[in-house]
Amino acid sequence: MKLCLVIKYPPIQGGTCTSGYWLAYGLAERGHQVYVVTNADEVEDEYRIHLSDGDGPWMEPTFEASGGFVKVFHTERFSPAKMDHIPKSNVYVTKLASQTAQVVREYDCDLIFSFYYEPYGVAGYLASQWTGRPLAMKHAGSDLERMLKNPTMATTYKEVLKATDGVLTRPNLAIRFMGMGVKPENIYAAGGGGLRTDVFNKEAEPLDLEALVNEKSWSPLGDHAPPFDPSVPTIGIYGKPGVFKGSYDLVLALSQLREQGVEVNFVALSDGRRAEDLKEFIKGKAIAPYTRLVPFIPNWKIPGFIRACTAVCFLERDFPIKIHTPQVATEILACGGCLILSNEIAQKQRYRDEIEDRKNLLLVKDPKEIDTLAAAIQFAVEDPKRAREIGDCGADLPINTGDPGAQVDFYERFFNRLIGRESDVAPIKTFVEKSSGTDFLPAFLDRLIPWLPAALGADRAEALKDDFLEIADISDDEHPIALARRYCRFLRAVSHGFEGEDHDFLQELLRFQETKLATSYDDPRDTVALFPVRDEIESPLDLKERVFGLRPMLNRSGRFESFEWNLAGLFKRGIQRSLGDAGDPTEAISKLRESTEKSPGYVLFFKTPNFLGGVVRVSDSTYDLLQLCDGSRTLEEVLAQVAEDSGFPADELRKPVTSTLIGLHQQIALIFSR
């Protein structure tokens, strides 16, 4: 195949770039002609990989045996003489779309693949429209959870996705894309996986750490830093640093050990603005004289770095993007590195049940607990031989999902499907139909309301679903979530054989589910935007005085419902988890009711642009407050009205009211407008 990949590519640093690079490499290795269009050469210095003369063949690999190759096309750097306009921008989408269309036409590419929505997805969409070539798209965590969450940008991404021939995602996220309007027959579960074990393995040649830090590194002591001593055990990290990455926790733990007389070096492959903040934090700490920060190096050199360190840390914790699943831990393990890992990341791994602390890695429950983290580091550095043995055991964990070429296998089959060739890759719609033995919409009801069989009993739930489907009169274009909402209303209308509080509880449970489902999709009949004007808050934590001159405005999809029980808490815990082994199905509703607090109150339901769905239980006072947030009053005027209604001084209300509204702003429940 001739493939045009519009992606991040070296010298951009990061996990998305790494995945895109190895995909291009693997496809070329199989004999495909891969044309990469990227703006990588324009990447900011803070996210730029430090390349050397020997990295050229890695950038555009060719494979004589198969005839495959990678050819890279970089966008032209911004030129004020040729590209200046007001207001100024680097027109990445325009440049990438134009160059992609030219490459597709010149080399007669079969397909366009975009990985990451901004700017690559939008550019790929435009080029696909112009050239008539099929378009495949894949997302990372941040563009789905952060970029698509932004009301001012989400419409573009949704329209692009609805026109994409093959949208790749995880099976559990498919419903989010259906909510955006993507057809089920165009949604595919991303397949394959596994590291390039020919690169990431225990036989990788260790880098010369002393030469690496002497070539180009930063020390808090500058020219007065003592020489780097490679005989001292070294703790390493690589990638973008930050609070959520546990970088600051690590510095505190290392400093604590140095203060206790434990000899240890710290080498970080980090750069950019976040690294500058970390550098300031390191200055004056006990670990400072023994710290070196080295600019980012290419991913294919990372195995040598891992092998050169006594232990390598990956301490991500409290990360705001829950679906974020970095590959760093797997890379370290594959290379036989002694991995010091946060429990948050450990629980995201397929091999989590086989992790044994101090046997195949060093597990840190919470890196913020500095004493615990320091103890794990000390265990590694006080006996480097033992650390190496732990790394060897870690390499034996089932870290790969089979053949490292499985990802390339999947993409070959997936691309063949999209260009009309024979392929066994099927969209999620077909997968659901085959696995259930029935049509997609009826089968998907069970996935949209998964707790029904456990709560009502499997036989009763199946019989009720059959009764519903007999009278449902499902149209060909009915949205799966709209059908599920109708199903909830049907279940509320029919007799379930429950009496008293169990009956009332089940009625509320179904009403809550139906309302929650309404926040999960774009109803084609609803043409009203979530917000009519742009958000004026530059940061969710912007609490400066100017905020009080802005007008808080509730999300237009916001809907308040009152419930007798705390069902928001029940759904957050998970109904199936709350049921556990319910025993007799007829007792399940009673068990759920008894485990749920009876506490009358309001719940705010609202849509988010990425259709994660907003559900917030609010107090009576917050409910009253939000009735004032219709965009007609400034925050100062809202405060004055609340003070008048409650009898409390406005100065006393200022902080709690503002904090409440800022918290809802962070969840996209409201904005602040002019």
Image: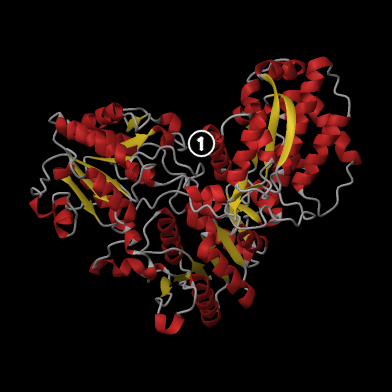
Q: Nearer the viewer, residue 3 or 606?
A: 606
Residue 402 at what x, y percent from top left? 46, 45
Q: Residues within 10 Å of mark 1 (few under 14, many from 20)?
A: few
On screen, 565 above or below 259? above
In the image, is 179 to the left or to the right of 45? right
On screen, 114 above or below 169? below
In the image, is 287 to the left or to the right of 160? left
- Residue at 54% over, 60% down: 117
- Residue at 77% over, 17% down: 586
In the image, is 376 to the left or to the right of 66? left
Q: Nearer the viewer, residue 75 or 615?
A: 615
Residue 192 is at least partly visible in this image? no
In the image, is 444 to the left or to the right of 407? right
Amino acid type assigned to the residue bearing label 1 in the image = Lys
On screen, 456 above or below 114? above
Q: Nearer the viewer, residue 561 or 404?
A: 561
Q: Nearer the viewer, residue 196 or 52?
A: 52
Residue 80 at what x, y percent from top left? 40, 80
Q: How is the image coloured?
A: secondary structure
Callout 1 secondary element: helix
- Residue at 60% over, 66% down: 135
Q: Quadrant of residue 405?
A: bottom left
Residue 588 at what x, y percent from top left? 72, 19
Residue located beneath label 1 in the image: 655
Which quadrant, please, contains the C terminus? bottom right
- Residue at 67% over, 64% down: 163
Q: Residue furthest right?
A: 471
Residue 381 at what x, y percent from top left? 19, 34
Residue 402 is at least partly visible in this image? yes
Q: Number of labelled discs?
A: 1
Q: Quadrant of residue 455?
A: top right
